[in-house]
Image (cartoon, grey):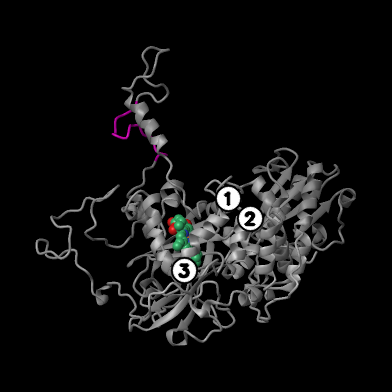
Amino acid sequence: MNKKKEDLQKNTIDNTKKAHMTTNQGLKVSNDEFSLKAGERGPTLMEDFHFREKMTHFDHERIPERVVHARGFGVHGEFELYESLEKYTKAGLFTDTSRRTPVFVRFSTVAGNRGSMDIPRDVRGFATKFYTEEGNFDLVGNNMPVFFMQDAIKFPDMVHAVKPEPHNEMPQAASAHDTFWDWVSQNTESAHMVMWLMSDRAIPRSLRMMEGFGVHTFRLVNAEGKSHFVKFHWKPKLGTHQVVWDEAQLINGKNMDFHRQDLWENINKGNAVEFELGMQLIPEEDEFNMDFDILDPTKIWPEEDVPVQIVGKMTLNQNVDDYFAETEQVAFHPGHVVPGIDFSNDPLLQGRLFSYTDTQLIRLGGPNFHQIPINRPICPFANNQREGYNQMNVTKGQTSYHKNYLNNNQPEPASPEEGGYEHYDEKVEGRKIRARSESFKDHFSQAKMFLNSMTAHEKQHIFDAFSFELGKCKDLGVRQNAVNNLLNPIDREMTEYVVDKIGVELPDTIEESNYEKSSPALSMANTPSSLETREIGIMITPDVPTEKMLTLQQKLEDKGTAVTFISDKIRKIGDDVMTETFDTVHSVLFDAVIILKGHENLHPEAVENLEIAFKHKKAIGFSTDDGDIFKALSFTADDKGVTNIDENLKQYLEDVKSHRVWDR
Ligand code: HDD
């Protein structure tokens, strides 16, 4: 049990143990079925304190959901450091390799409500709370390394634009509507982020298979006071993988909890979910060496120019006990830092430093939200901030002010040597102005670089995503503006493709960016791929011999994959394997499929499942005891990624491992 889990024990109530029911005052309850009435058929009595307490609690069981990132899923884990980074920082979690720092991670979508589906086209939040020995450090990042704007003052506008439209509250959890595209086409600093949002990064296969980014340039400061600029990266051990858009839409219908269920079940099965922490570092004196401003949050530092140093690993290995108490009440803040970690002047980061505490005050009902068990630091804690709503602590002592004589000046500030936080003494000079630096002006070069770095299928998906999203906009002016202001300045081929699909005019002048650089690290195709935890759905006709099914299952599980049999109705295979049915699951919920045919004909649902798996470029394996499987299907055994598993199981597994048969 990690230190944070241990700390949570102080507040854990075990409702699985035998116990009498009580009121909140501890009084044993004798009856929880009937309210107190005047006569069997009479009115309920005011005096029924048990009824009133139960109902009042129920009536108050909701808190405001987060304005953004409302739908989230949290898990516990630990962070371990590979090598001391004392050259760059004095932060304990980055210098002491013997530590196992407890973490709590909350993954989220951004635009949808708390009850929305798991795979809309959206950015994913990737927020990590490190419970360090020097206080909590929150890395509040996303699965995309850039952002929609350069200045936080625009954040409410962008969020208003992407959220359901204010007059009719439509559409839910989608950017494919007029107000979003109106905003981004009027604010072209969003161009790079929009490319990411239209890419497959926005529809991850799993929360276990996406990268995370701190986005901003932060600072590391070492014991001598030397500073490096830093960007944080999370690299998933399983690689970065996607579903296809058509599949995402079907999954949302078949299982809107697809991502959270995948994470919950894999952790329960004991499959460690691992992300390596990477850092890109630039010494302070090299601040101006890039062809963009490193304070600009719409820019990445290409990994080929500034390599990502892998410094440690986070293992997520425990689910929460109580969704509300932990996942809903956790409060992140990019301003929660520890000595050795500091901010840059990125104007987006600077604005965030205000917003997060402010939002917790309304969401969690007052200034004591840090005392909620999931938010409480595991290190010693003392200050003069008593009172306020929901004060949980009983603090001893006559004084609640600094400085004092009566209490010997306790609690007293710590010197830097004793671990007191010191802000980096950066020199800043300037006049008060509302303006943006000229160095933030280039909106399109990195958007183009992103496109330059894609494989053919990734590029095609981006073109199709633009066509879908703009095609959903009702106002032709909005479509035209998006084409003129965002697409045309990036790429002519993309502009021509999309214009043809969405019925607007092709701009007369070509403004395409001539930025030729590419960054191979941006392509998901260049990330690792493995068979580990791949889900294979095996469709069967009822007459397939049990022995054959169990042998196949064993072979596939030995390779690290997870197997589900699918049949016309629930059937038992051997002693302890139960099938799912064509009613309960679908090929869209699996990475790959297999069809096992005995002498009976294929179920019509099996035919439909196979056709869709083929369309979604999934590996398809087959084995038949009798007759031609392909008579009922629109594809054949000669198509790419369609394999007779009796003859070549190895080939089939290669296809499964490569995630999808993209060139089919
Ligand atoms: Fe934010 C939540 C990430 C810009 C204001 N943000 C929130 C969460 C994540 C991010 C992951 C959810 C945390 C959780 O799981 O509880 N936000 C980002 C990133 C940004 C970013 C990576 C840009 C680099 N955010 C941003 C700006 C502002 C906010 C510019 C406002 C000035 N974000 C908020 C918020 C939220 C929030 C309103 C809503 C709920 C919360 O904070 O706790 O304060």
Crowding near the residue tagged with mark 1, few <14, some 14–19, many ≥20 C-alpha atoms within 10 Å: some
The residue identified by callout 1 is: 165
- 298 left or right of 629? left
Ligand 1 within 8 Å of the CB at mark 3: yes
Q: Residue at x 76, y 54 (%)?
A: 613
- Counting labels gives 3
Say which amino acid is labelled 1.
Glu
Q: Earlier in the sequence, mark 3 or mark 1?
A: 1
Question: Magenta: predominant secondary structure element?
Answer: loop
Q: Quadrant of the N terminus?
A: bottom left
The region drawn magenta spans: 15-29
N-terminal of the pair, mark 1 or mark 2, is: 1
Do tag 3 and tag 2 residues touch (Cβ < 8 Å)? Answer: no
The amino acid beneath tag 2 is Asp
Report whether 236 appears left or right of 323. Answer: right
Disc on res. 348: 3
Under circle 1, the secondary element is loop
User: Would you identify the image quadrant in which residue 487 lies?
Assistant: bottom right
Do we see residue 482 in this rendering?
yes
Dots 1 and 2: beta carbons under 8 Å? Answer: yes
Q: In percent of the image, x 60 and y 58: which residue is there?
A: 180
Pair 3/1: label in front: 1
Marks 1 and 2, how far apart at CA: 9 Å
Residue 320: percent from left, percent from top: 46, 51
In the image: residue 358, left or right of residue 565: left
366 and 519: which is toward the camera: 366
Q: Which mark is residue 178?
A: 2
Q: Is residue 291 magenta?
A: no
Mark 3 and mark 2 lie on one chain; the one further toward the N terminus is: 2
